[in-house]
Amino acid sequence: MLKIYNTLVREKQKFTPIVAGKVSMYVCGMTVYDYCHLGHARVMVVFDMVSRWLRASGYDVTYVRNVTDIDDKIIKRANENNETIAQLTQRFIDAMDEDSAKLGVLRPDIEPKATEFVGGMLTMIAALIEKGFAYPAANGDVFYSVSSFQGYGKLSGKSLEDLRAGERVEVDSFKRDPMDFVLWKAAKPGEPSWDSPWGKGRPGWHIECSAMSAHHLGQQFDIHGGGQDLQFPHHENEIAQSEAAHSHDGKPCQMVNYWMHNGFVRVDDEKMSKSLGNFFTIRTVLEKYDAEVVRFFILRAHYRSPLNYSDQHLDDAKIALTRLYTALRGLDVIDAKVDWQHPYAVRFKQAMDDDFNTPEAMAVLFDLANEVNKTKSADVVSLLKNLAGVLGLLSRDSDDFLQGKSNAINANADGAKLTDNATTLNVDDLITKRLEAKKAKNFAEADRIRKELAEAGIILEDTPQGTTWRSA
């Protein structure tokens, strides 16, 4: 029986999906104006682990993770780089996909971009105005009225009175209340904009997730995930928007049944921050450490606990993962399904069903490795390999890992190795066609070519010197 810690009620609850046998899950993704950092890596790996376990448990999972491809930071960075917003965001979407593939993260089932759903956002904003939860301001913005939503603060546990007390009052603000937040921003000169009933503008950040989750998963869905930093105000505002917009006869429609938040990433026991000089991108970390070591390090901690990054902890993770690979070295692995009645498998399942307790699940892997070292039993070898595969680990040949031949993890769901299809695909021709498509701003075709190559086990890496490729 799977139990999930639900942030909304602050306790573990038995997981009961809305539709038996199916799970709908939405996770807030990245704002693509720079390379992904360690905090992003944790979100990617944690919810990849969650979706893998749900699937291993027999659920039919629909996993949606959005991409924010329009906001103030994106506009500012594109202007600084003298490039279009589309060029900037596509470049960093490609980089994000490369980083996540190296970490063994499976692609979500659906990856919507905010700019593709402006119409749905406009519809939701109009509904909020009609129902009295939002108002157009004199400057062309549209604001959400937090005082109109009775349940505001229920996710974060914050009261409006306390929030208002700590809120700085803006001079000449067009808000009715300091806590009101923007749903639609009036266009500024030189910024991208869309037509709306309230004039040209663009959506606020919070409304995009409400519109995209509703479009793909419905007005109510099972699981909403993201980093702990999004709990307030982003997720709080999502609840206010969605439940008000979908209310019937004045009664809010519950948006999400289970809210999940992974803990912060710290660096040497300090908050990761550019100002402190301890800010690391995934790419920087992977220059020094094998990608599977980084994935192992992330999963070795419980997803809700703080994750403390340091060279010592990564070195320890490498030593520990080496122990597992060493146990399998030179041994044949039977291609067999997991026997969930096996005592070790029972322990593994109990750990994962207890709010995805990966530290305890990994302890089972090390007990299995000890058993392999003692007995060399084919059944135990297979069980170790396959249980680790559920976590996206031990998918490589032991010698490859131990000799440091590859810094990428195979991201196949079943742990099977990808075939190197470089001999059957003319990779260089496809890379040339992809570059031509990008120059013509045909990003859909460029994405299709990248996906075709990725499915064939070929990873593209865009660098200032050009595009290179390697086998996954």
Image (cartoon, rainbow, N blue to C red):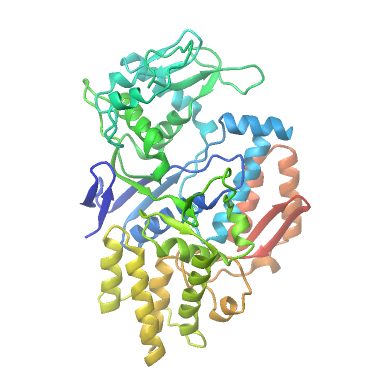
Q: Nearer the viewer, residue 164 or 454?
A: 164
Counting from the top left corner in percent of width and height, residue 113 is at: 52, 37
Q: Nearer the viewer, residue 313 or 183?
A: 313
Counting from the top left corner in percent of width and height, residue 98 is at: 60, 55
Q: Quadrant of the N terminus?
A: bottom left
Q: Is residue 27 left or right of residue 427?
A: left
Whether residue 340 is visible, yes or no, is no
Q: Is residue 2 above or below residue 406?
A: above
Quadrant of residue 182 within the rendered picture? top left
Counting from the top left corner in percent of width and height, residue 4 is at: 27, 53
The residue located at (57%, 61%) in the rendering is 102
Q: Is residue 249 left or right of residue 222?
A: left
Residue lying furthest top: 138
Q: Is residue 313 left or right of residue 340?
A: right
Residue lying furthest right: 465
Q: Quadrant of the C terminus?
A: bottom right
Whether residue 303 is visible, yes or no, is yes
Q: Is residue 30 left or right of residue 83?
A: left
Residue lying furthest bottom: 375
Counting from the top left corner in percent of width and height, residue 8 is at: 27, 41
Disc tally is 0
Q: Is residue 300 above or below residue 322?
A: above
Quadrant of residue 460 within the rendered picture? bottom right
